[in-house]
Amino acid sequence: MKKVSEIISAMLEYYAGDVLRINHFLKVYAFAKAIGEQENLDANIQEILETAALVHDIGIKISEEKYHSSAGNFQQIEGPTIAQKMLERLGYEESFIERICFLIAHHHTYTNIEGIDYQILIEADFLVNIFEEKISLEAAKGIKEKYFKTKTGARFLEDLYL
């Protein structure tokens, strides 16, 4: 596994001065890492998950510049290209980068979830977004029922909010 610190450093540089975005991706990373480890992912999938968690919102910056919006659909459009360049610069293999880009391009799409890495990324992002977006208790219950599939993710949501 490449050093997570290299990706964190690259993302800190990319989002320099934007403490909210930096804190967001670090929190999503922490939850994704913990869920993946407790769900016993194999090392390759765990590395993909952790990397995707760190860069999942990389498209926000250009979306805000280009569309004046950080909406998920714009992030999914703009993020993969930026992440690909960053990960290539850091020396990741093409197949690895392709999966990360797929996850970025779909992390706000909650249908046809393909793969445990995709599932956990969505759960980790929700765990952070429920707090950051001040989502109601009732809505959090609905999110759990509709989108959470891992035992660990569901337990984290229960412990945090319910």
Image (cartoon, helix red, strand yellow):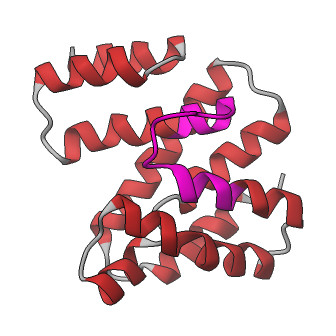
* Residue nearer the viewer, 135 or 91: 135
Residue 21 location, quadrant: bottom left
From this view, report whether residue 5 is shown above or below residue 17.
above
Above or below 128: residue 77? below
Residue 155, horizontal then vertical, whole percent: 41, 12
The percent position of residue 15, horizontal first and vertical second, equals: 42, 78
Image point (35%, 88%), residue name: 66
Picture coordinates of residue 126, whole percent (x, y): 36, 37
Stretch in magenta: 100-121
**Residue at point 70%, 81% (across, down):** 85
Asked if residue 139 is positioned above or below residue 66 in the image, the reply reads above
Residue at point 58% right, 66% down? Answer: 8
Residue closest to the eye, 69 or 88: 69
- Residue at the far bottom in the pictured view: 65
Name the side, left or right, on which 74 lies relative to 40: left
Q: Quadrant of the C terminus?
A: top left
Compared across the picture, whether 89 is left or right of 123 comes to right
Q: Nearer the viewer, residue 83 or 17?
A: 83
